[in-house]
Image (cartoon, helix red, strand yellow):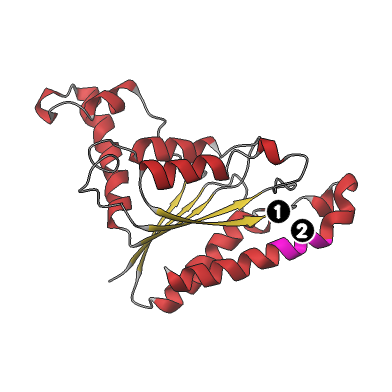
Amino acid sequence: MATLLHIDSSAFTGRESTSRAVTEAFRRAWLEEHPDGEVIYRDLAAAPVPHITADAHTAGSLDPAEHSEGQARAFAERLALIAELEAADAVVIGAPMYNFSVPSSLKAWLDQVILFGRTAGSPESKVKGIPVTVVTSRGGSYAAGTPRAPHEHVLNYLESVLSVILEMEPTFIVADLTLAAHIPALEHLAPLGEQSRADAFEAAAKAARAA
């Protein structure tokens, strides 16, 4: 039975969140391809995972028999998150841009699941090669050639983390200009924003069928 790990990190819900809408479209399309599949869902905004601590970090390089009570507790939380990722045949992540980067809740999750010797830097890693579709939404446009292109730190960061550290197989879906219709200075770009959103839904369905 195929398993999809679905992660959302937007602080907004419902129609206010483009990334959530597109990841949900991916999920529906994936289930159409895998009617007997299982979906593991994590809403990092509604139920944030802990930020990495010294106990959680150092426990990864120690024999479990040497763990303090705090290290054992923190490491158990890490292992639970890692097990979810290792169990997945495909992953979809909603990663809206906040202040030029990813939500801190998503960064916290990544810090927890990156464990050198297991999910990273290991030839026996179970996450290596897993297809991961990242849906990012931006209020403006950060495409190459635009004035704000140098400030795009979502795709660059996630490409490095997912493909270089975790050695997964990332695909990126971008919805630009999501706030164009609500910002007077960008209103003339609203049709481009609508087209970008429509393209994102189409790309999500295509990616889900291939995952």
Q: Which residue is the site of mark 1?
A: 176
The answer to if 20 sits in the magenta stretch is no
SS majority, magenta:
helix
Label 2 SS: helix
Give the quarter of the figure containing the N terminus.
bottom left
Image height check: is 139 above or below 23? above
Label 1 SS: loop
| Residue at horizontal 18 percent and vertical 21 percent from the top | 68
Query: Amino acid under label 2?
Result: Gly
| Residue at horizontal 89 percent and vertical 45 percent from the top | 185
Mark 2: few, some, or many residues within 10 Å (few <14, many ≥20)? many
Dot 2 or dot 1: first in sequence order is 1
Mark 1: few, some, or many residues within 10 Å (few <14, many ≥20)? many
**Which mark is on residue 193?**
2
Toward the viewer: 155 or 204? 155
* Cβ–Cβ under 8 Å for marks 2 and 1: yes
Tell me the distance, in whole angstroms, between the alpha carbons under discs 2 and 1: 6 Å
Query: Amino acid under label 1?
Result: Asp
Left or right, residue 166 beside residue 28 = left
Magenta segment, which residues?
191-196
The answer to if 194 sits in the magenta stretch is yes
**Which mark is on residue 12?**
none
Give the image location of residue 60, x and y in percent.
23, 30
